[in-house]
Amino acid sequence: MLGNQSSQPKRRSNAVAPDVNGDVREGDRGQGQALVEFALVILLLFLLLFGIIDFSRLFFAYATMSNGVREGARYGITHPPAPPDYTLEASEQEITAAAQAMMVVIGSDATIQINYPDSGSQPDPYCTHLCRIEVVATSDFPVWTPFIPNIQIETSATMHYE
């Protein structure tokens, strides 16, 4: 053996530079890297989580709006305005109330429009068969996920007078 060499090989350290006291911590580099990776991954996970929550809310809002316009159209065909006391405004207010009673829209209220495709802008009081009523609801849906704009939901139901 030459000189005063030890039998153990020298270890190379991948640690950061020594601190003020000259001590070198080998675990600091790994902990910092883990923290940066965690910050990047948690950001993507939260984005995915809020996307799933928003899609569920959107699906729920669309389903309740569809049910509401269907109920409004059903109310309109089973309670047509009769010619003696024929008032279009009162009939449309009742149809709107029936539609809104079945809607649970999270965020903003739905705007309901009532159309009569077979007779122009007003229903024909003498049309009792094969005339249609269409109820359309629109709403701006606010999302919680960042970077995604608000979504406009529109649904409609068309039924024939009975």
Image (cartoon, grey):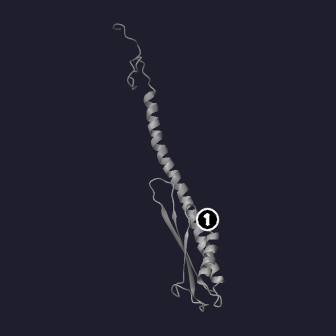
Q: Is residue 51 above or below residue 108?
A: above
* Quadrant where the C terminus is found in the figure: bottom right
Q: Residue at x 47, y 45 (%)?
A: 43
Quadrant of the image occupied by residue 130: bottom right
| Residue 112 drawn at (x, y percent) | 55, 73
Q: Which amino acid, by three-letter code, is at mark 1? A: Val
Q: Nearer the viewer, residue 108 or 148?
A: 108
Q: Which of 52/69 is in front?
A: 69
Q: Secondary structure at mark 1?
A: loop
| Residue 48 or residue 128, whichever sits in front | 128
Q: How many marks?
A: 1
Quick check: 118 left or right of 161? Answer: left
Quadrant in which the N terminus is drawn = top left
Q: Quadrant of residue 100?
A: bottom right
Neighbor class of circle 1 (other Cα within 10 Å; few <14, some 14-19, many 20+) is some
Residue 37 image offset from top left, x and y in percent = 45, 39
Could you tell me which residue is drawn at 60 percent across and 90 percent down? Answer: 125
Residue 5: % across, % down: 37, 10
| Residue to which mark 1 is pinned | 104
- Residue 80 as seen in the image, left or right of residue 5: right
The residue sitting at the bottom extreme is: 126
User: Could you say which quadrant of the image residue 28 lies in?
Assistant: top left
Q: Position of residue 26 (x, y in %)?
A: 44, 25
Residue drawn at (48%, 40%) of the image: 38
